[in-house]
Image: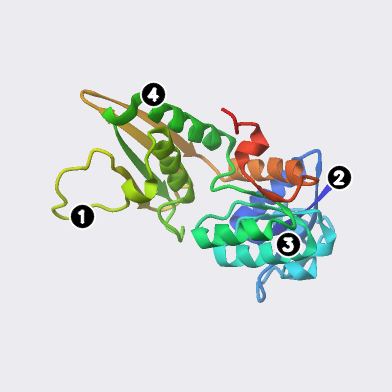
Amino acid sequence: MIKVIIAGAGGRMGKRVAHMVDQHPQLQFAAAFEAAGHPDIGRDAGLVCLGRKNGVVIGEGLESIIADGDVIIDFTFHKATMEFARIASAHGTAMVIGTTGLSAENLSELAVLAKNFACVQAPNMSICVNALFKLVKKTAAILGDDYDIEIVEAHHNKKKDAPSGTALKLAEMAAEGVNRNLEEVGVYERNGIIGERKPKEIGIQAIRAADIVGEHTVYFAGPGERIELTHRAHSRDHFAKGAATAAAWVVGKECGVYSMFDVLGLQDL
């Protein structure tokens, strides 16, 4: 069995990850940790996450329990994630990163750190969303420059980053499909008298409201018609399930950063 360490086990995503790990035939919920001062430190992780004891005590910080697992699953916050990655690199422990909001600098550092450990990093762990990434690129390539591309994403009011990592990846895939550089054509906010839409713009807009788990729609709009590709998340379980799948896949792989395309065999599609 592959022994899994769950970061932020007391949080909403940590608990869902625990459920998916517990159900996976190749994985064992072996260790868990929280940030210093968290009220769940010292409690039974099974009781906190699964509603039944499993003998795993929630530790204070990753260093306190890293020897107990083969792979870390992390959906916390980008600053914490990078610190966990540095620790994982020092110990050679595999990692699955579902945290969003990682900057270009963070990703560059991660690529260097991953010379010492295997890591799956993706803006979205959902199997359906990763299929959507591929569909968006192919649709953009088919329709070409005659169709305006716009992306709208919606999430709960507690989400700290905008636009979402998933929306940015969708924009990146669309840009690749029409041979554009997203840094040059991405438009992230429209306000006031902005003039006509530039032909090669890719618009990305964010909504934050209530308890929306996550919704993304990509519009391809042409004269008299449009295509809308939409993914709606009904719960966090599909993110957690994808992360569990990635954890089972990454252990034993060569050092380096992998994507969910690698995990799901979608890289060449």
Instruction: Point out the frontmost of discs 1 and 4.
Output: 4
Q: Are marks 2 and 1 in contact (CB under 8 Å)?
A: no
Inter-mark Cα distance, 1 to 4:
31 Å
Inter-mark Cα distance, 2 to 4:
44 Å
| Above or below 234: residue 266 | above
Residue drawn at x 24%, y 52% is 190
* Of pointers 1 and 3, the one earlier in the residue sequence: 3
Q: Can you name the residue that lies furthest to the bottom here?
A: 37
Instruction: Point out the frontmost of discs 3 and 2.
Output: 3
Label number found at residue 142:
4
**Secondary structure under badge 1?**
loop
Label number found at residue 191:
1
Label number found at residue 1:
2
Q: Nearer the viewer, residue 215 or 268?
A: 268
Tell me: 215 left or right of 241. left
Amino acid carrying mark 1 in the image? Asn
When asked about the image quadrant of residue 111, the answer is bottom right
